[in-house]
């Protein structure tokens, strides 16, 4: 063991907007989205070894290492650069699995950032993002240095946006996840071959929270809501009372941004507390103002 080690808080993300277009020649869908980091994150630590390769994550203890995206990120970095020979990854999960918050992607991005920090010959920033794009649509943003960005293609094309002022966020977790591949399949089956408009989001739409709330959209909601009453109930409450509720990614997480209205409110209008759907958990966090740096351990 070389003794080189570092850790990072691998921040989760929400999608303030997410549109899904048709299939690309490579079999993936083109998307248009607005990413925003959260303060919530997984604790990821990487230690360089002389050849042994391992990953420890309690929530994925029954999975093969190759099924863990963070492990695959380390293997990809080693393949592309010839270093390291071995690695030991430890992940403490705080981001729920299958929730649309980019937990696995955040872990993979964190591993890429750690390895590039520990390397004596780090790859250029653009090369690191190219590696990230191989791993998934959310990984380039989470491996990058932006708090907020508009993204196209498979997530590899990004335009940094000025971060919105930090806000309190409530995250609602139904007692199930939504498989991303299945969500895309449902969307394709529901609407057939995509023939709608192309990218339409603009930076001006996300200049402040009120405009962002009015411009927010998630194409997956149309097919997920009818199949999951818990998600429908949460989003319906936001619609009824003009509050900023949205499903993140392909779900199942629904987020609420505190103090943001999606319509004009009457002066005497009261917003009742809603009972959470059965089995739904809630976590309080905030939107981020900065990207957490890599911390060297020894």
Image: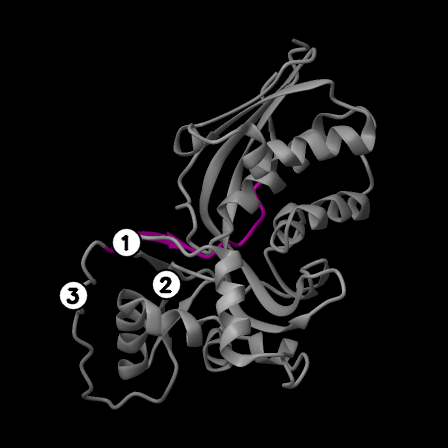
**Residue picked out by circle 1:** 282
Q: Is residue 102 visible?
A: yes
The local secondary structure at tag 3 comes to: loop
Q: Residue 114 vs residue 242: left or right?
A: right
Q: Residue at x 60, y 39 (%)?
A: 108
Measuring from the top left, give residue 290's x and y in whole percent: 56, 50
- Whether residue 165 is visible here, answered yes or no, is no
- Name the residue carrying label 3: 275
Residue at 65% of width from left, 85% of height from top?
A: 195
Q: Position of residue 189 (x, y in %)?
A: 52, 73
Q: Quadrant of residue 169?
A: bottom left
Residue 178 vertical placement versus 233 (above, below): above
Q: Nearer the viewer, residue 181 or 86?
A: 181
In the rendered image, residue 281 lying in the magenta stretch gets the answer yes
CA gap, disc 2 and disc 3: 15 Å
For disc 3, the neighbor class at 10 Å (few under 14, some 14 to 19, many from 20) is few
Q: Mark on residue 72?
A: none
Tell me the SS state at disc 1.
strand
- Identify residue for label 2: 254
Q: Which residues are magenta?
A: 280-293
Q: Position of residue 15 (x, y in %)?
A: 51, 64
Element type at mark 2: strand
- Alpha carbon separation for disc pair 1 and 3: 12 Å
Instruction: Look at the picture and state if 290 lies above or below 10.
Output: below
Residue 55 left/right relative to 4: left
């Amino acid at each position: 063991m070389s003794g080189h080690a570092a850790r990072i808080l691998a921040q989760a993300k929400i999608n303030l907007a997410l549109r899904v277009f048709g299939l690309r020649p490579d079999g993936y869908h083109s998307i248009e989205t607005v990413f925003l980091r959260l303060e919530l994150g997984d604790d990821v630590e990487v230690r360089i070894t002389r050849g042994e390769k391992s990953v420890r994550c309690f929530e994925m203890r029954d999975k093969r290492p190759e099924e863990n995206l963070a492990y695959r990120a380390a293997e990809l970095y080693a393949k592309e650069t010839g270093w390291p020979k071995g690695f030991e990854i430890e992940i403490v999960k705080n981001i729920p699995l299958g929730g649309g918050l980019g937990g696995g992607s955040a872990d993979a991005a964190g591993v890429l950032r750690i390895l590039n920090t520990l390397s004596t010959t780090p790859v250029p920033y653009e090369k690191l993002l190219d590696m990230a794009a191989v791993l998934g649509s959310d990984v380039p943003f989470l491996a990058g240095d932006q708090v907020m960005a508009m993204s196209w293609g498979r997530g590899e094309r990004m335009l940094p946006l000025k971060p919105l002022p930090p806000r309190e966020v409530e995250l609602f977790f139904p007692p199930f996840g939504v498989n991303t591949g299945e969500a895309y399949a449902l969307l394709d089956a529901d609407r057939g071959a995509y023939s709608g408009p192309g990218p339409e989001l603009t930076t001006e739409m996300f200049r402040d929270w009120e405009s962002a709330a009015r411009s927010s959209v998630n194409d997956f909601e149309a097919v997920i809501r009818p199949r999951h009453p818990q998600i429908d109930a949460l989003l319906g409450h936001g619609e009824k009372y003009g509050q900023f509720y949205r499903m993140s990614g392909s779900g199942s997480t629904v987020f609420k941004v505190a103090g943001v209205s999606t319509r004009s409110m009457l002066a005497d209008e009261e917003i009742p507390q809603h009972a959470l759907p059965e089995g739904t958990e809630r976590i309080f966090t905030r939107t981020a103002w900065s990207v957490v740096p890599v911390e060297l351990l020894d």
